[in-house]
C-alpha cells in the first residue's frame, strides 16, 4: 500500500517524523463497546498457517466451515494477542471468509426473493452476518488500540490503522448487502462504527489512499479490486441513497456497479451550517446509528457532521435513463450509456428505471406517525397472470363456470397465508392497513413459510371488501421492509382505477384521407397487424389517463404504433413514455383518438344489466 507518512527531507525532519512530532490531533472519542480480553476457553491458533489447518480439519461442509471460522475469530478477539500477531491473523481470516461468502451470497441472490423468506436462506444469511460482524469487531479492537496511543507509537502503526479502517467499512458494506437481501435495516452499531471511523480518520489522515480490497480475492459481489476509505464510505451510503428496500434482491448488486461507474457522483464534505437544505443533501454525524438522513442533526453532541451531495448522481441517472430509452427505441445497442452497459443486458432496463425511481425522496419506514392498524377487509391478487384472470372474471361475472373457477383465488386474496404456524394465523395473516393515500398504501402482515409469495415490482389488483374488489385498483409492490423476523411491511403504488385484458399487436402506421388528422383515426384491418399478439392490460388513471401494461419485453417501445384488440374490435394507438419497467411488466402511456373522453367503468353489480352497463374502453 501507499505509505501514509511522507518521506523525510532532512535529519531533523526525519527525527521529528520518527517521534510523531507534528501529527494532527486524534481527539475524536471513538465510543466503541470493546469486549474484555481473557485467556479462558479455547486458545486460538496463533498464526495464519495454524488457522488454515484448523479450518481444514474441523469443517467438511460450507456451513461447518463458516461456523469454525466464526469460532476462531471470536477466540482471536478475546485472546490477549499483540497487534503484530492479531493483524495478520485477521487479514487471513477475512480473506478466507470473503472467498467463501461471495459465491454463496451470489447464489442466494439468483433465487426468487421477496416474501416469504425460506428458513434455510435466513439461517445461512444470519451465519454470514455473524462472521462479518465478528471480523469487524476484531479490526475495531486493533483500530481503537492504535488510534488511542501516543504519537510515538501511533506513527509506527499508521498504515495498520488505515487498513483496519478500510477493512471495517468493507465488512460493514458486506453486512449492508446481507441486510438488503433480507429487507432489514443494518445494525445500528455497524452504522455508528462506520460514521465514527470515517470521521476520526478524516480528521487526522488522508482518506483517499487506495488499498487492495477483499474483493480482489473474489469479484462475484464487487468488481473493485482497489478502493480508498472514502470510496468504501460512499459505497456504503449509496444503498440508502438509492433505497435498497425498493429493489428486487437480485438487482441490488447493480447499486454497487452503477455507483462504482460514477466514482465522483457523491461528494462528501464538512457540513457548512450556512448551507440551506436541498433535496440532494444527506447528513451523517460522527455518532449516528442510522444511514445518512435528510435533515441535519439538532444535537451538537453527535460530533462532526458530514454532508453527502448526490446531485451529480441524480443527473447521471436521469441522462442515462433517457439515453437507454432512445437506444431501445432505435434498436441500437451501441447507443447504450457506458455506465448502464456494465449491467447485464437482460436486467439493464429494469435497473435503469429502478435507479430513477428510487433516487426520489421516499418516506422513511420509521417516519410513520403511530396510527392504529386497520383490518378493512383488504383483498389482493398478486402477479400478472392472477391480475389478468381476476379482471377477466370481473367482466364475466355472470358466467357460473368462471365464478366457480375463481373461488379458491378469491379466498386466498383475503389473507397473506391460508395456513398458519400456530393458532394466531387466522388473525395475524390478515392484511392490516397502516397508511392509505391517493397515490400509495402501506400494509402489514405476519410472515410465515406459508405466506403468499410477493416481491418488489409485483403487479397487483386489490380492493376493500366484496364490492370494491369487483372494481379493483391496479398497483404494484414498490418496497418491502421487515422490521423484525415474522413481520413484513409492503408499500403499494397506485397505478390505475380501471383495467381490462386486451391483446396487443404491432401495427403499421395508418393513413387517413386528411393528412392533418390523427393517424390513430385510420381504419384497421387484419392486414395492418404484424407479428404475434401480446397479452396486455389496458388501464386508466384519473390523472395520467390511459396506459397499457405488457409482460417484460422491448419489441414494442415508446413511439411505436400498436393495435389494441378488445373482443373483436381493433383500435390503432401509439405508445407513449415508458413509465415503469420491472421484472414482471412494462407500463406505458398510450394514446388514441378513438379512446372515449369519459372515464371507463367496471360492470355494475346488478348481474341482470352487466352486459349493458360494462363500458368498453375503446370504440
Image (cartoon, rainbow, N blue to C red):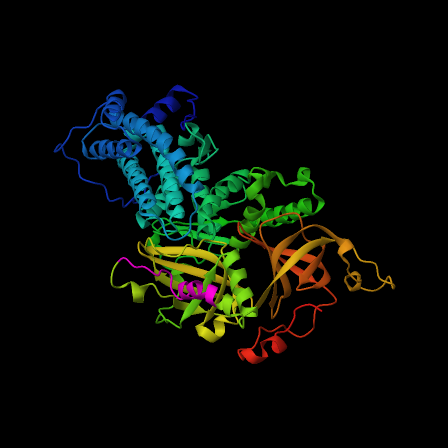
Question: Is residue 405 rendered magenta in the image?
Answer: yes
Quarter of the C terminus within the rendering:
bottom right
Question: Is residue 6 rendered magenta in the image?
Answer: no
The answer to whether residue 577 shows anywhere in this view is yes
Q: Position of residue 513 (x, y in %)?
A: 87, 63
Residue drawn where x is 26% and y is 26% of the image: 55
Instruction: Decide if residue 556 is on the left or right side of residue 79.
Output: right
Instruction: Decide if residue 184 is on the left or right side of residue 327.
Output: left
Above-or-below relation of 390 to 243: below
Q: Position of residue 83 (x, y in %)?
A: 25, 28
The answer to whether residue 559 shows anywhere in this view is no
Quarter of the N terminus within the rendering:
top left
Range shown magenta: 404-421
Q: State the image quarter where residue 590 is shown.
A: bottom right
Question: Going by the picture, which residue comes out furthest to the front?
Answer: 401
The tally of labels here is 0
For the residue pair 170 and 471, the one nearer the viewer reads as: 471
Q: Position of residue 146 (x, y in %)?
A: 28, 33
Above-or-below relation of 194 to 510: above
For the residue pair 265 and 504, the one nearer the viewer reads as: 504
Q: Position of residue 350 (x, y in %)?
A: 56, 48
For the residue pair 397 and 441, the one nearer the viewer reads as: 397
Q: State the image quarter where residue 76 is shown.
A: top left
Instruction: Decide if residue 175 is on the left or right side of residue 390.
Output: left
Question: Going by the picture, which residue comes out furthest to the left?
Answer: 40
Above-or-below relation of 83 to 588: above
Amino acid at each position: 500500500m501507499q505509505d501514509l507518512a511522507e518521506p523525510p527531507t532532512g535529519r531533523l525532519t526525519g527525527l521529528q517524523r520518527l517521534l510523531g512530532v507534528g501529527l494532527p490531533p486524534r481527539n475524536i472519542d471513538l465510543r466503541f463497546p470493546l469486549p474484555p480480553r481473557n485467556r479462558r476457553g479455547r486458545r486460538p491458533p496463533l498464526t495464519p498457517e495454524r488457522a488454515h489447518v484448523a479450518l481444514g480439519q474441523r469443517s467438511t461442509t460450507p456451513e461447518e466451515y463458516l461456523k469454525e471460522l466464526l469460532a476462531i475469530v471470536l477466540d482471536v478477539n478475546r485472546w490477549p494477542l499483540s497487534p503484530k500477531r492479531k493483524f495478520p491473523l485477521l487479514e487471513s481470516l477475512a480473506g478466507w471468509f470473503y472467498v467463501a461468502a461471495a459465491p454463496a451470497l451470489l447464489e442466494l441472490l439468483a433465487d426468487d426473493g421477496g416474501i416469504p423468506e425460506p428458513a434455510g436462506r435466513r439461517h445461512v444469511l444470519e451465519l454470514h452476518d455473524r462472521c462479518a460482524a465478528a471480523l469487524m469487531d476484531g479490526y475495531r479492537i486493533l483500530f481503537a488500540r492504535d488510534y488511542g496511543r501516543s504519537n510515538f507509537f501511533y506513527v509506527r502503526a499508521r498504515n495498520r490503522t488505515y487498513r483496519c479502517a478500510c477493512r471495517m467499512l468493507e465488512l460493514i458494506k458486506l453486512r449492508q448487502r446481507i441486510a438488503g437481501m433480507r429487507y432489514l435495516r443494518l445494525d445500528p452499531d455497524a452504522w455508528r462504527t462506520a460514521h465514527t471511523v470515517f470521521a476520526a480518520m478524516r480528521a487526522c489522515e488522508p482518506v483517499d489512499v487506495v488499498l487492495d480490497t477483499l474483493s480482489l480475492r473474489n469479484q462475484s459481489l464487487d468488481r473493485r479490486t482497489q478502493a480508498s476509505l472514502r470510496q468504501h464510505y460512499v459505497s456504503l451510503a449509496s444503498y440508502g441513497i438509492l433505497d435498497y428496500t425498493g429493489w428486487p434482491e437480485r438487482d441490488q448488486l447493480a447499486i454497487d456497479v452503477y455507483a462504482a461507474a460514477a466514482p465522483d457522483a457523491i461528494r462528501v464534505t464538512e457540513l457548512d451550517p450556512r448551507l440551506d437544505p436541498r433535496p440532494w443533501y444527506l447528513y451523517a454525524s460522527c455518532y449516528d446509528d442510522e444511514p445518512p438522513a435528510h435533515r441535519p442533526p439538532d444535537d451538537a453532541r453527535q460530533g462532526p457532521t458530514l454532508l453527502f451531495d448526490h446531485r451529480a448522481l441524480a443527473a447521471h441517472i436521469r441522462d442515462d435513463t433517457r439515453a437507454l430509452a432512445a437506444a431501445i427505441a432505435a434498436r441500437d445497442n451501441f447507443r447504450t450509456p457506458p455506465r448502464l452497459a456494465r449491467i447485464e443486458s437482460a436486467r439493464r432496463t429494469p435497473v435503469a428505471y429502478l435507479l430513477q425511481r428510487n433516487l426520489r425522496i421516499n418516506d422513511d419506514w420509521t417516519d410513520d406517525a403511530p396510527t392504529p392498524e386497520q383490518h378493512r377487509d383488504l383483498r389482493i391478487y398478486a402477479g400478472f397472470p392472477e391480475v389478468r384472470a381476476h379482471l377477466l372474471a370481473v367482466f364475466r361475472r355472470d358466467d357460473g363456470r368462471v365464478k366457480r373457477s375463481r373461488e379458491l383465488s378469491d379466498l386466498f386474496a383475503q389473507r397473506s397465508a391460508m395456513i398458519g404456524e400456530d393458532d394466531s394465523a387466522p388473525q395475524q395473516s390478515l392484511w392490516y392497513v397502516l397508511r392509505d393515500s391517493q397515490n400509495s398504501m402501506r400494509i402489514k402482515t405476519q410472515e410465515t413459510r406459508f405466506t403468499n409469495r410477493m416481491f418488489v415490482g409485483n403487479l397487483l389488483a386489490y380492493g376493500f371488501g366484496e364490492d370494491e374488489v369487483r372494481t379493483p385498483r391496479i398497483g404494484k409492490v414498490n418496497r418491502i421492509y421487515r422490521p423484525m423476523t415474522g413481520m413484513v411491511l409492503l408499500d403499494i403504488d397506485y397505478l390505475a382505477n380501471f383495467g381490462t385484458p386486451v391483446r396487443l399487436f404491432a401495427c403499421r402506421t395508418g393513413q387517413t384521407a386528411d393528412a392533418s388528422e390523427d393517424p390513430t383515426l385510420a381504419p384497421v384491418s387484419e392486414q395492418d397487424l404484424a407479428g404475434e399478439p401480446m397479452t396486455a392490460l389496458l388501464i386508466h388513471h384519473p390523472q395520467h389517463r390511459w396506459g397499457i401494461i405488457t409482460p417484460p419485453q422491448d419489441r414494442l417501445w415508446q413511439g411505436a404504433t400498436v393495435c389494441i384488440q378488445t373482443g373483436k374490435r381493433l383500435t390503432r394507438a401509439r405508445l407513449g413514455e415508458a413509465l415503469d419497467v420491472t421484472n414482471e411488466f412494462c407500463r406505458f402511456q398510450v394514446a388514441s383518438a378513438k379512446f372515449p373522453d369519459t372515464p371507463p367503468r367496471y360492470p355494475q353489480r346488478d348481474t341482470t344489466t352487466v352486459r349493458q352497463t360494462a363500458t368498453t374502453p375503446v370504440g
